[in-house]
Image: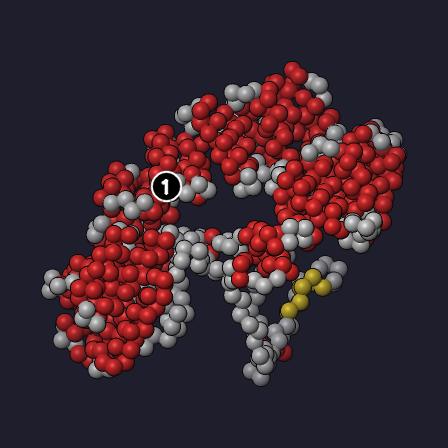
Amino acid sequence: NRVVIGPGVPFTATVDLPTDVEATDVEATLFDAQDHVLISDRPKQAVALPELPEPVGPPVAPEEIATVDELYLTGLRLQQGHSPVIPPEPYYEEALRRDPNDVRVNTIVGANLNKRGLFQDAERYLRTALERLTSGYVRLGDTEAEYQLGLALRGQGRFGEAYEQFFRASWDAAFHSAAFYQLAELSMREGAWGRALNEIKQSLSTNTNDTKSLGIKAVILRKLGHMDEALVATSRALAIDPMDTLALNERLLTLQAANASVEADVALGALTRTLRDDSQTYLELATDYGNVTLWGEAIKVLERLVEREVTFASSYPMVHYYLGYFHAQSDDRAASFTSYQRAAGMPAEYGFPFRLESIEVLKAALSAQPDDYRAHYYLGNLLYEIQPERAIGHWEQSRDLFNGFSTVYRNLGWAYYRTRGNLTAAIKTYERAVVLDRYDTRLYVELDELYQAANVPIVKRLQMVSVNHEVFERRSDSLLRALMVQVLAGDYETAITILEANQFFVAEGGGRVHGVFVDAHLLRGLTRLKGGQAREALADFERASEYPENLSVARPRNDRRASQVAYYTALAHHALGETERAAEYFRRAADQLGTERWPDTWTYQALALERLGYADEARQKLEAVLNAAEIQLARTRDEVDFFAKFGSRSSEATLRSRALSMLGFAQQALGRTEEARTSLGRAVDLDVSQLWAQYYLISLP
């Protein structure tokens, strides 16, 4: 069966199979036009492992780990797995506290500092590693520290010293290719083309399919005038990767140098299609040339983009900052000044540089134009992930130069809280950002998150939502935030109306919209139940058990809210005199498999058990809730959720408030009313956003 298929042309088919065919008998294969197998799949019979491996758990605190070796490996695992909540650095620091000269730890710390552009700091750690490695005139088998030291020295502009280090690193097969590649680039910076050619050949001898090295080889051959060999190098690179932009550009330049105008036009078309009018692909290609001081080639790359007048790409500020930098390196001060001025006037939207090379570019721009507040802003954006305090400094300079740029205030507010832990300064800065741009929905979401962290009264948060509701409605995440505040304020009717009328799109790691949906319906239902409207309350409770399509949240295998919803549904049936239906829902509430890891659900299960006549089992479960709550309260702030998604991390006040809420509800169920009042009152004092703690508290007699 021959079909046309591609990323934009999907193919599906239904095939009738004999009844006696098993899934493991069926194989699906996709061939290309020449009958080569592209992909094939055949289900295999699952075989149960005789013994499952130990589940991954969070590492113990660094000081509790016995050896330096284990500290290194723990840090390495956290680094490779990229834990969003537990950084590897404390494990490396503890290892170096015990053995300041440990080779592996100093090397990995130095390598990490190189990645952050902290080359001087990296040099210190790497020299410490090498001091132990090379004592007694030892020649190294593993030259990672030598190679990383070369990168640190090159990053500081100490090219002669870097050259020596890369030569030493080349003795190890693992770093032979990478080291000779670096040597070739350093030789190109000096214009030593013959030496560079020998070095890039050495690099390719142990990494023959490296397209970057093949592209650099083509550059060198073109500079030496060996046009035919240069074209061969580009052909080799493009045979491996037809979208390699350096090889495509070198093919163009070589054909132009050879006066092959027809072939050059074809090459230009192929290059332009591959670059896709994307500013980042142009910048990446220009950076390749800038790294070897081929300023003219770098300028031509970016000028082609500017000449195309593609609205977004050609007006991207970093394109013009790079042009200004390249012109300055070529001693064309007038062109450099023009480019810097143009860059400073470009729209700042989406201006988020990320290359380490951009640090030098932006610093050069600031040397030429010290009052360019946007260059400080971009530099802060680049540095925040890797050098946060320096980023804050640049954002503050940007703010001081121009106090009308809302995004600078937003970034400072973000950093004041997440880097410095200064919640008061963060809120003040965000409030200024909102004044400057009251139509940026994200500002309101983040400001309300700070209000919640600061335990700001709900009435103030509701006022912000009410005054700016048309802004909150622009995005589903900001609308969800508004709904959370409305439910906290007791405006269930409005929240439910909006929830029913809007389509929500849940990003990965989200899903809270269904929780708000459940809260709104349960609380409105409870209000109706207390008011004698049991039938209307039942409708709310039944609706709370659903997963409407417009919320974009599927029913989980184990539903954390199921016990609570079933319990209140049973109460509504009981109020209506429907005892059999009430008993059915009490049984559902009591028998919720898969919720063992959620102690906050056990109280509802216990209440249902008590209604069913199982008083002893109910008391045992409530005692288990009390124990779980006390354990949570005893935890320190440093005991984080190792499996938290996307670095989500609740404040200590919120964590304690949740535990107190769970404790108070269980105490209430046990009839210990005054203890419950104290626990729930403390929970609300710590976090007014603890919705159910508020409800339990006002429900007490």
Image quarter for residue 613?
A: bottom left
Nearer to me, 434 or 566? 434
Image quadrant holding the C terminus, namely bottom left
Q: Using residue 539 as the reference point, say whether residue 432 is left or right of it.
A: right
Residue at (44%, 43%) from the top-left corner?
A: 418
- Residue 188 lies, in percent from the top left, at 80, 33
Q: Is residue 691 above or below residue 187?
A: below
Q: Is residue 565 above or below residue 124?
A: below
Is residue 432 visible in the rendered image? The answer is: yes
Nearer to me, 19 or 579? 579
What residue occupies the far left of the structure in this picture? 532
Residue at (67%, 64%) from the top-left corner?
A: 39
Image quadrant holding the N terminus, namely bottom right
Q: Using residue 327 as the reference point, say whether residue 605 is left or right of it.
A: left
Is residue 569 visible in the rendered image? The answer is: no
What residue occupies the far bottom of the structure in this picture? 20
Nearer to me, 569 or 463? 463
Question: What residue did someone put label 1 on?
Answer: 423
Nearer to me, 488 or 47? 488
The 10 Å Cα crowd at callout 1, few under 14, some 14 to 19, many 20 or more, is some
Image quarter for residue 560?
A: bottom left
Image quarter for residue 660?
A: bottom left
Residue at (58%, 38%) from the top-left corner?
A: 354
Q: Which kind of residue does numbered mark 1 sit on?
A: Leu
Q: Using residue 549 as the reference point, say whether residue 93 is left or right of it.
A: right
- Residue 25 lies, in percent from the top left, at 63, 78
Total marks placed: 1
Residue at (63%, 23%) from the top-left corner?
A: 324
Q: Using residue 568 as the reference point, say whether residue 215 is left or right of it.
A: right
Q: Secondary structure at mark 1?
A: helix
Q: Is residue 319 above or below residue 531?
A: above
